[in-house]
Amino acid sequence: MNRRDFIKTSLTGAALAALPRWGAGEEPPVAAKKRPPNVLLIFIDDLGYGELGCYGGKEIPTPNIDAFAATAVRMTDGYVTAPWCAPSRVSLLTGCYPQRWGCYDNPSSLIPADRKIIAEYLRDAGYVTGMCGKWHLELEKGPMPDRRGFMEVGDVFNGPQSAYVRKDGRYSTTKFTDTAIAFMEKHRDRPFFYYLPYNAVHSLLHIAPGYEDRFKEIKDEKRRQFATMLTALDDNIGRLMKRLRELGLDENTLVFLLSDNGGYPYNTSVNTPLRGYKCQLAEGGIRVPFLVRWPGRLKPNTEYRQPVIAHDILPTALAAAGVALPDGAKVDGVNLLPFLTGADKGDPHGALYWELDGNAAVRAGQWKFSVDGKKPRPKLYDLAADIGEKKDLSAAQPEKTKDLLALWEKWRAANQPMRRREKPATAKDKGGHP
């Protein structure tokens, strides 16, 4: 995305944010005259595409997230840039493919010191910024979030995943929500950005405190444990949104809710109807629940069916805030506001790209091209007709396969990493389970 395109879409977002919600002749509230929107970014860990009721899930009720979805835009084709934790977070916070920084796996998750992340941009624009939860970045030697633009930092950890009970004895899902609510209460009179990366529903599996009597009908113990974890998460997101309304901040808050990657067999989370799971470039590893909510600006209870990706969040949030990137600060993401409002009927991305451990994938329109490093013959899927990637059309569509391979090679050449590990990460590097 070049500077001209970003400024154009930023102005579109800023103009959109200024649209009135009051009747003709009425005087707008003082806050509406002066305040840019708050931004709340909720990042869930290892939640499969098919778990939530709003994405077709039927086994575990998720009434609060479903109620959120009924007031939001639901992305049917929302992606992350990597099928596991750290590179996905690098992309989310920088607005770029993680390959730009040499981030392919969990240990290699350093963000260059001179690369601003979303919190730094918004802090410099006058926002108060905060976070708590799972950071999982810059593990080797880099700074923690208090030196990356977050002005107020609550309980933050990189792992292990078993740390659901925090040092003070409180359950992490509840504690993180309490901290976010306290931040909103404290800064209700200022524009704020809050990043809330939960560690749920990542393993290690357990019965969430207070949910011991729930889901006894589920015979598989691991699945029952997961059900209580997801229900606790859903209840806390409901509590968070309720408090946002009570504080009178609801209509002036842009909220993103998505997962960092697809579900994983170990935590039993399902990706139906997608093929594959976390750690793979099949759709089940990279296509995730992805919701965007901004009352009065985005039409509620709607679907958006063009491919979008997590690194679109940074330019979208900055555009909503009226913040333009400085010269030379390239991002790969796109401001989604004109697309989500219908002002732009086009495709936000000509193509999306992935690379991981010798595997490659490209999404261009309805087409998905993929190469498994162990079986290097390219495969081609028509996702409009075959969301489960069951029928390889590469032999029937050789020209389309060739075209997407050329797109991949061009992107790969332009995104050679600044730094990269000498060898792929091992299971031990990833803490046994990524």
Image (cartoon, rainbow, N blue to C red):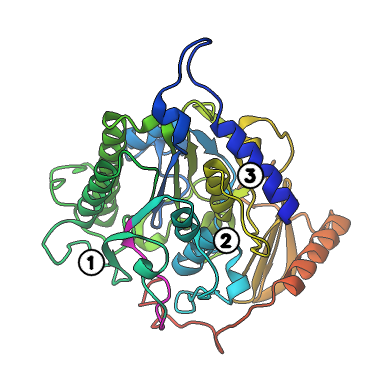
Q: Secondary structure at mark 3?
A: helix
According to the image, label 1 marks what residue? Answer: 163
Q: Secondary structure at mark 2?
A: loop
The N terminus lies in which quarter of the figure? bottom right
The C terminus lies in which quarter of the figure? bottom left
Rendered view: 89 above or below 291: below
Residue 159, image quadrant: bottom left
Q: Among all residues in the image, which is located at the extreme right?
A: 399
Q: CA distance from mark 1 to mark 2?
A: 26 Å
Q: Amino acid at mark 1?
A: Ala
Cβ atoms under marks 2 and 3 closer than 8 Å: no
According to the image, label 3 marks what residue? Answer: 10
According to the image, label 2 marks what residue? Answer: 81
Q: Earlier in the sequence, mark 2 or mark 3?
A: 3
Rendered view: 33 above or below 159: above
Residue count near mark 2 (Cα–Cα under 10 Å), binned few <14, some 14–19, many ≥20: many
Left or right side of 402 for 12: left
Q: Amino acid at mark 2?
A: Thr
Closer to us: 316 or 352: 316
Q: Where residue 167 appears, x then y in whole percent?
A: 14, 67
Residue at the image position 45 percent from the left and 20 percent from the top: 28
Rendered view: 251 above or below 156: above
Cβ atoms under marks 1 and 2 closer than 8 Å: no
Q: What's the magenta region? A: 131-141
Q: Where residue 180 appears, x then y in whole percent?
A: 28, 49
